[in-house]
Every structure is written in C-alpha cells, then in structure tokens.
Image (spheres, grey):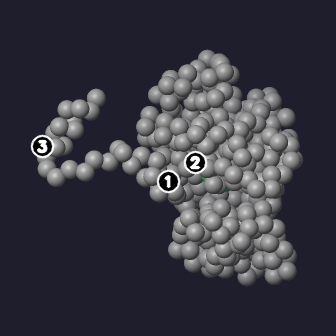
Amino acid sequence: MKHGEPWPGIIGKYRKYLPVTEEMPVVTLLEGNTPLVCARRLARQVGLRAELYIKNDALNPTGSFKDRGMTLMVSKALEEHVPGVICPSLGNASASAAAYAARAGIRCIALAPEEVVIAGQMAQTLIYGARVCAVRGNYDDCAAMAQEIAVENRFVLVNSLNPYALHGQKTAAFEICDQLGQPPTYVALPVGDGGFMAALWQGFKEYGNNKNRAPRMLGFQGNGAAPFIAGHAIPDPQTLAAAIRIGRPANWQGVLDAVEESGGLLEKVTDDEIVAAYQLIARLEGLFLDPSGAAALAGLVKLAGQGFFKPGENVVLLATGHGLKDGYRAAIQEPSEVLYVDNAEEIQRVLENVH
Ligand SMILES: *Cc1c(COP(=O)(O)O)cnc(C)c1O
C-alpha cells in the first residue's frame, strides 16, 4: 500500500505479517484503520495521571473488533472451498461472521444462548442472512456444539479457536504502534474468550522493533464471569457485559502468557462499576462503548484510584464494541433524562435550569 492510496483493509495493509498467499481471495469490508482518540477529560476526571487513549474498534464495519479476524477466517474458508462457516456467539462474533459470509457468498450458522436471542442481540446476525440457532444452554455449550458440528460437516469454525482469528486481530496492535509512533506503556481491554488479549500481545511482540518496549497488558473481566482470576472455569458465568460472559475461555494459556510475559495484570469489576464507566466515557468524551469496553474502563478507573499510573506513561483502552449494539440498555439506564414538553416556553424554562 503506497501513501495516499485508499485503505485496503487489514489483509491488504499488513499482508507480510499474515499467513496468506497472493492467490488467496480477499473477503473484506475494509475493516481496521480505526481512530485512536486522546481522552483528556476522562483521564482528568478519574485521576488517571498517565495519558489515556481510546482505540475505537467499535468503528469496524459490523461494530466490533471481531471483523479483524473475520476477514482472514472467511477469506481462508473461501480459498478452501468449504460450504460455510459456523460460529458460537454472544452477538458480535456472529454478526461479523454473517456479514463476511454474505460478502463471500457462503453459508453462516450462528449458535447463541437462547437468552441472547430473546434479548434481541442476534438481530444484526439475522439481517445478514445467517441461520441462527437458539441453544438452551450458555455460551460454553454453544462453543462445544459448534466445534462438533464443524468437524462433521467441513464447516469452518470461526471463533478464537481458529488460528486465523488471532492473526487478524493482532493488527490492532500494529495500528496502535503506528498511531502512537511507538508501543504504549499499557494496553487495557476486556477479556472473554481471551482471543483478543492473546492476539494483541502477539501483535506487539511481532511488530517492528518492539522487543525491548512491549506494553504491559491489563485484562478485565466481569465479577461473576472471571475464570482467569478464579483460576478455573465458571459453570454459570454472570456479568452485565454480555460479550464477556464466558466461563470456559478458549485461550487460557494465551492470556496467562500475555499477562506474565508483559508484566501486566488481570482484574475484575462489578456491574455497578461497569455502568458508571459506561456513562462516564459517553458524557466526557462522546464515545458510546458497549458494556464490555466499559468494563475495561471501569478497571482502569479502579487502578487509577490506587495511584497505579504515573505521569509520562500512556494507556490505550480498547473500545471493543459499539454501544449501539445494545442501545436499549442505554435507554433503560437513563429514563429520567428525557423531558416531555408541549411548547417552546417549557423548553426555555428547562434551558434556564441547565448549567
Ligand atoms: C468478543 C468481544 C470481547 C471479548 O473478546 P475475547 O477475544 O472473547 O476475549 C470483548 N468485547 C466485545 C465487544 C466483544 O465483541
């Protein structure tokens, strides 16, 4: 890619870092190249003394970072002439799989827990034409079933057990290095299956000349869904952050290695802390994160309160998914903010009382 050429998507841009040949058909929605936004008001408000940046991966084509892995997994699936892809999901992975499968002209089957389907979180997956199965069980049950079906039917499993998922997702680390001019001191993100944490760490190690200065990886989980912190699987995981409600993560060792090798840490946050962070970043920075990204922010707020970060350091928070994915939650969070009026005078009175 030469200077001034249009963005080609992550495969076109980072081809030499990916296990692809020139012959592979590229299925892309021009994912990647997402903004890195400095969040000064937020950092000041929470007493975070380092510089804070938000890597807004919510602005990928289907609204989450999952598109980075999906472009590569679906391109490979097309190259291998398989009939389709299959995906266990809490909403975002299957939305991404369905979109890329639609573009490739192959089938997509999504397996989601029944409660996720009932909550309306498979709407985006359905609109792209995927077949959705509502599984009476949790995400971990969906993952086990998807794996079994994939093996028996030559469908490609497109979750983070597929090695190409991590190769695609690591490009977020490349972009962060390019945007900052060097790796940050810390990288903070929510951890569900652990794929993104493992992928980012891989990316920071591989890219350019980062050997001596890779960031420390900070991973955050929901209080009731924190297998990495408990040190064992959680049979009935619970957290408000639906995208990280995973009790039996697929990338166990990858996450532990990332945290240990980088000198990072894992921490958990409560639902109340997630809601507070979710509102704070929207109001102070105009960024509408999904609750999982907010969970990572809640973790940063907690660490900042303990004086963890120092002046001169910088922190990159991964906004992993878009708040509009679950806009309904935002609406029920703040019903009292809406004022019902009949005329301009009433609005005038409101203005006079707003500071
Ligand atoms: C998938 C997802 C996560 C968790 O990523 P893992 O690779 O499963 O750890 C976090 N946030 C959002 C919005 C997601 O879609």
Please report contact status of discs 1 and 2: CB closer than 8 Å, yes or no: yes
Q: Residue at x 19, y 32 (%)?
A: 352
Q: 121 or 170: nearer the eye?
A: 121
Question: Label 3: few (<14), some or many (≥20) within 10 Å?
Answer: few
- What percent of the width, then of the height, locates residue 2? 58, 50
Q: Which amino acid does label 2 sit on?
A: Pro
First-in-chain label (3 vs 2): 2
* Quadrant hosting residue 270: top right
Q: Mark 1 points at which residue?
A: 329
Please report contact status of discs 3 and 2: CB closer than 8 Å, yes or no: no
Disc 1 residue: CB within 8 Å of ligand 1: no
Q: Which amino acid does label 3 sit on?
A: Glu
Q: Residue at x 58, y 20 (%)?
A: 49
Report whether 51 appears left or right of 21. Answer: left
Report whether 127 appears left or right of 230. Answer: left
* Quadrant hosting residue 307: top right
